[in-house]
Amino acid sequence: GAVVSQHPSRVICKSGTSVKIECRSLDFQATTMFWYRQFPKQSLMLMATSNEGSKATYEQGVEKDKFLINHASLTLSTLTVTSAHPEDSSFYICSARDSLGAGYTFGSGTRLTVV
Amino acid sequence: GENVEQHPSTLSVQEGDSAVIKCTYSDSASNYFPWYKQELGKRPQLIIDIRSNVGEKKDQRIAVTLNKTAKHFSLHITETQPEDSAVYFCAASLYNQGGKLIFGQGTELSVKP
């Protein structure tokens, strides 16, 4: 079945630095990628939607200059958290769909801790 | 945009009993309603889904019902087991249009032996 590989699984960074999270579709072409953030004991909140080769569409309240999304190829999408602060500490998870729109395939998630 | 409300937030049942989780959605155009089980620190796992052209779907101990008119759908788990303990999320999307998946708030299910 469809697989999305997400890395890193865990990352600790210092305040003010940037962190990049990668999601790769291993056996299909991810034409659309959704990025979610999940705080402890809360739901998955959609941050943005990206289509390959296009600029990402951000949900209301999500700072596009802080959360940079790149979807330059059909197999790779990245989320960069810039100038990270402790309040950015969260579980980030991607979800990909192919051109046929067959389901939503989730990555394994990234636990970000900003100290 | 779509908004999904989920209840209850916590649910505790005895092993063998049934569990029911309910969700409502706001966008009448939504046509795909999956349910996910998520264990701590892991990705959501799809357990069952339903499209808007059917009213009920069953897979062994799990069933989902959909009422399009009322815009609500429910998850039913029968003969619950301790390993069913997890957080369950409902979601809704406009499937064929590459729609974004919007999640409910989640239900923490605890099945007591």
Image (cartoon, rainbow, N blue to C red):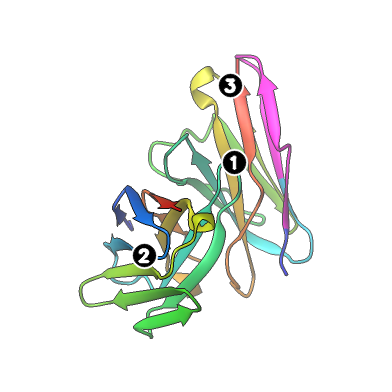
Q: Position of residue B92 (x, y in %)?
A: 40, 64
Residue on which the image places disc 3: A84
- 3D distance between C-alphas at marks 2 and 1: 27 Å
Which of the two discs, 2 and 1, sits closer to the camera? 2
Q: Which residues are magenta?
A: A4-22
Residue on which the image places disc 1: B41
Q: Position of residue B5 (x, y in %)?
A: 29, 54
**What residue is rendered at 42% in x and 59% in y?**
B15
| Residue A7 drawn in magenta | yes
Can residue B97 be seen here? The reply is no
- Name the amino acid, label 1: Gly
Report the side of B50 relative to B45 (left or right): left
Q: Give the chain of mark 3.
A: A
**What residue is rendered at 43% in x and 78% in y?**
B51
Which of the two discs, 3 and 1, sits closer to the camera? 1
| Residue B72 drawn in magenta | no
Residue on which the image places disc 2: B17
Q: Give the chain of mark 2.
A: B
Q: Secondary structure at mark 1?
A: loop
Answer few, some or many: residues within 10 Å of disc 1's Cα (few below 14, many 20 plus, some between 14 and 19): some
Mark sitting earlier along the chain (2/1): 2
Q: Secondary structure at mark 3?
A: loop
* B57 lies above or below A12: below
- Name the amino acid, label 2: Asp
Q: Secondary structure at mark 2?
A: loop
Q: Position of residue A77 (x, y in %)?
A: 69, 48
- 3D distance between C-alphas at marks 2 and 3: 46 Å
Residue A89 position by quadrant: top right
* B89 lies above or below A82: below
Q: Give the chain of mark 1.
A: B
| Callouts 2 and 1 on one subunit | yes
